[in-house]
């Protein structure tokens, strides 16, 4: 390697090591990155790419996918025709390590360090705590009450959010409403877009995602309408620096609940019921049955529609994708993997214990 290359390697290793050491101090991450550097980075990203009518991040992912496929095909050809030696494998390993090091640095500087912050529970002084089955049962009852009360008005408003501009504008407004009461949820220079891979998402089982390389919140707009408002609010939560899934759920809950649109409120309680109801079923299925029977027929119809939707796209690849994503979550400070989404329930119970059931 040339002297310049060696110098670049040294710089990358030093920077990656510094990021790793810095990530071990959540208070410093919270103060200097999540509330300091990151809001500037994310806003610049949204200003640069938010005005475009298409997803720059999705095009970037598509380019990377094509490049990887091309590289894999080239590697297979080299191996097939035995056009390699020991030096080839050393070069290949070196390039892979270089690419991994670069991605690690860029990912963490643009967003990934938010996984190591103190987070939303610290900011709002509502720490998660252990809860009993009785607490969980009470929460499910409260959620059912909200769902039943919102159902009729939400159904009337549902057609309006078929227009994605209306959906995204209402999601942005819900954060503006929330930030009026709590400035930590301020959302300047918004950027929310439909995913170019929405139909792929149906097969892979995702409803939305955040692109840290472009700062865009992406929403799968082919899933049932009644879950899209909460998904959009959840992804905006990621944009605001709440990297962990339970924290993005908390931000999504607080914002959707602040909306004046019944369709948004219904959407968040619908999602919360999925989490809380599943958890109660796992603890004591007998307790859930009479509660589930209290749901209005129209609400139960929505649950059946969602179940049928995912059933139509059931395929052998999706479980492997979920497993891989679960490993990604575990590698980023979320030891529960996919179940990290459900951790919003622990915070929600602590929230209503602090502020009363009416706060839900």
Image (spheres, grey):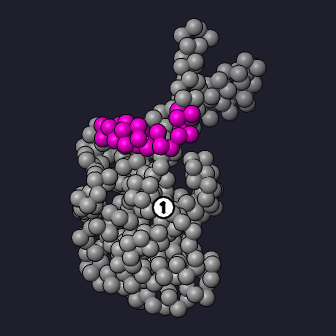
Q: Nearer the viewer, residue 292 or 312?
A: 292
- Asked if residue 217 is among those painted magenta in the image, a careful observer would answer no
Stretch of the chain drawn in magenta:
19-45
Residue 338 in percent (x, y) is at: 58, 60
Secondary structure mostly taken by the magenta-highlighted segment of the chain:
helix
Residue 122 shows up from this direction: yes
Residue 108, relative to residue 242: is it above or below? Answer: above
Residue 137 in percent (x, y) is at: 52, 82
Q: Nearer the viewer, residue 323 or 7?
A: 7
User: Going 59% across and 13% down the picture, which residue do you hit?
Assistant: 6
Q: Which residue is mark 1?
A: 127
User: Going 39% across and 84% down the picture, which residue do you hit?
Assistant: 145
User: Going 41% across and 71% down the picture, which residue do you hit?
Assistant: 354
User: Going 57% across and 34% down the picture, which residue do you hit?
Assistant: 20
Q: Nearer the viewer, residue 173 or 156?
A: 173
Residue 172 shows up from this direction: no
């Amino acid at each position: 390697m040339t002297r310049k290359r060696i110098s670049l390697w040294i710089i990358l290793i030093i920077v990656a090591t510094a990021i790793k050491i810095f990530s071990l101090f959540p208070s410093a991450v919270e103060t200097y990155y999540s509330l300091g550097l990151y809001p500037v980075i994310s806003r610049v990203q949204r200003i640069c790419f938010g005005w475009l009518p298409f997803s720059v991040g999705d095009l970037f992912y598509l380019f990377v996918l094509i490049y990887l496929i091309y590289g894999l095909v080239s590697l297979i050809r080299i191996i097939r025709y035995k056009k390699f030696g020991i030096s080839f494998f050393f070069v290949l390993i070196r390039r892979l390590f270089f690419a991994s090091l670069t991605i690690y640095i860029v990912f963490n500087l643009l967003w990934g360090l938010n996984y190591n912050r103190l987070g939303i529970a610290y900011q709002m002084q509502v720490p998660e705590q252990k809860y009993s089955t009785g607490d969980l049962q009470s929460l499910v009852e409260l959620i059912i009450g909200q769902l039943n009360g919102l159902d009729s008005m939400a159904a009337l408003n549902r057609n309006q959010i078929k227009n994605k501009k209306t959906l995204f504008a209402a999601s942005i407004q819900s954060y503006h409403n929330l930030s009026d009461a709590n400035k930590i949820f301020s959302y300047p220079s918004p950027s929310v877009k439909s995913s170019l891979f929405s139909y792929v998402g149906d097969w892979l089982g995702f409803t939305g995602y955040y692109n840290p390389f472009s700062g865009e919140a992406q929403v799968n707009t082919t899933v049932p309408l009644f879950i899209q408002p909460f998904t959009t609010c959840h992804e905006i939560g990621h944009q605001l620096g709440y990297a962990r899934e339970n924290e993005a759920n908390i931000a999504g809950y607080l914002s959707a609940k602040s909306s004046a649109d019944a369709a948004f409120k219904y959407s968040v309680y619908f999602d919360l019921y999925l989490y809380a109801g599943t958890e109660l079923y796992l603890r004591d299925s007998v307790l859930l049955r009479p509660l589930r029977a209290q749901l209005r027929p129209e609400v139960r119809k929505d649950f059946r529609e969602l179940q049928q939707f995912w059933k139509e796209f059931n395929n052998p690849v999706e479980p492997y994708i979920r497993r891989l994503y679960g490993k990604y979550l575990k590698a980023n400070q979320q030891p529960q993997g996919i179940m990290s989404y459900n951790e919003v329930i622990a915070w929600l119970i602590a929230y209503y214990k602090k502020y009363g059931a009416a706060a839900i």
